[in-house]
Amino acid sequence: MKPTIWMLVLVLAGCASKPQPPDWQPNAKSALDGFTRAWLDGDTAAADAEFARARRETASTGRFERVAQAELVRCAARVAALDYDCPGYAALARDATPAQQAYAAYLQGQWQGLNAGLLPEQHRGVVSGGTLAGVQDPLARLVAAGALLKAGKIAPADIAKAVDTASDQGWRRPLLAWLGVQEQRAQAAGDTQALGQIRRRAALVSEKP
């Protein structure tokens, strides 16, 4: 047999011997991705169906931390749209890992005594600096903005950045939520010109075919 054919055989044998991940892992990831897309687009029914599938897949392992991780994905997506209700994770909190507990506290704006070193890397600087600077991923940026708002530490420039991020991605639900924040601030400031523009923009986002 020629050397090149031998090499091909060895490569194929190596691929065949590589263990495949258990089915629940890609199934859960696919469902969580589907949930996130549907939630950000404002399709609650589809989001709920996808998350139920992700929950079933992770629960099949009987591991609290795996289900808690799925619940935290849901919590984070909700926080990106300024919805801080996370009962699914709350029921699992005592069995979650320290890193998961820290992330949950971060999402809820409970930063007093928070060990930022346990957070995902892109969120550590948000706690120490109180700004979105350095958060490159669009979804992570919106999650961080939601956490900053909940903690009472967000700056007007970061509110505008959250609006722009949701707008650039075409994420209807968080865009409407952050436009609502801008609307409240414009109303409090008596800025009728800005208020009118924000409301027209929100109406445009809310248009139905």
Image (cartoon, rainbow, N blue to C red):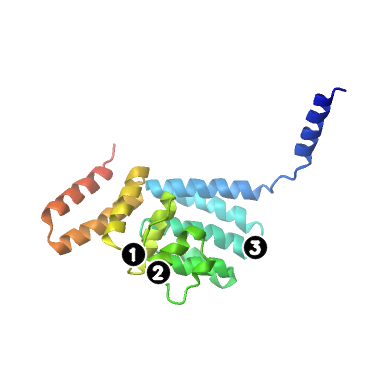
Residue at 37% x, 48% y: name it.
Answer: 42
Residue at 78% x, 38% y: name it.
Answer: 14
Q: Distance between the residues labelled 1 and 3?
A: 32 Å
Q: Residues within 10 Å of mark 1 (few under 14, many from 20)?
A: many
How many labels were placed on the picture?
Answer: 3
Q: Which mark is residue 109?
A: 2
37 lies above or below 195: above
Amino acid on which the number 2 mark rests in the picture: Gly
Would you say residue 91 is visible in this rendering? no
Residue at 63% x, 50% y: name it.
Answer: 25
Amino acid on which the number 3 mark rests in the picture: Arg
Q: Where is residue 111 in the image (x, y as percent from the top left)?
A: 42, 72
Query: Looking at the image, which is closer to me, 101 or 48?
Result: 101
Q: How far apart are marks 1 and 2 (CA)?
A: 8 Å
- The mark closer to the camera, 1 or 3, is 1
Q: Where is residue 68 in the image (x, y as percent from the top left)?
A: 56, 63
Q: Which mark is residue 149?
A: 1
Q: Position of residue 183 (x, y in %)?
A: 21, 57
Amino acid on which the number 1 mark rests in the picture: Leu
Residue positioned most to the top: 2
Tag 1 near tag 2, CB within 8 Å: yes
Look at mark 3 in the image and give the residue it sits on: 63
- The mark closer to the camera, 2 or 3, is 2
Q: Which of marks 1 and 2 is nearer the N terminus?
A: 2
Q: Where is residue 35 in the image (x, y as percent from the top left)?
A: 48, 49
Q: Earlier in the sequence, mark 2 or mark 3?
A: 3
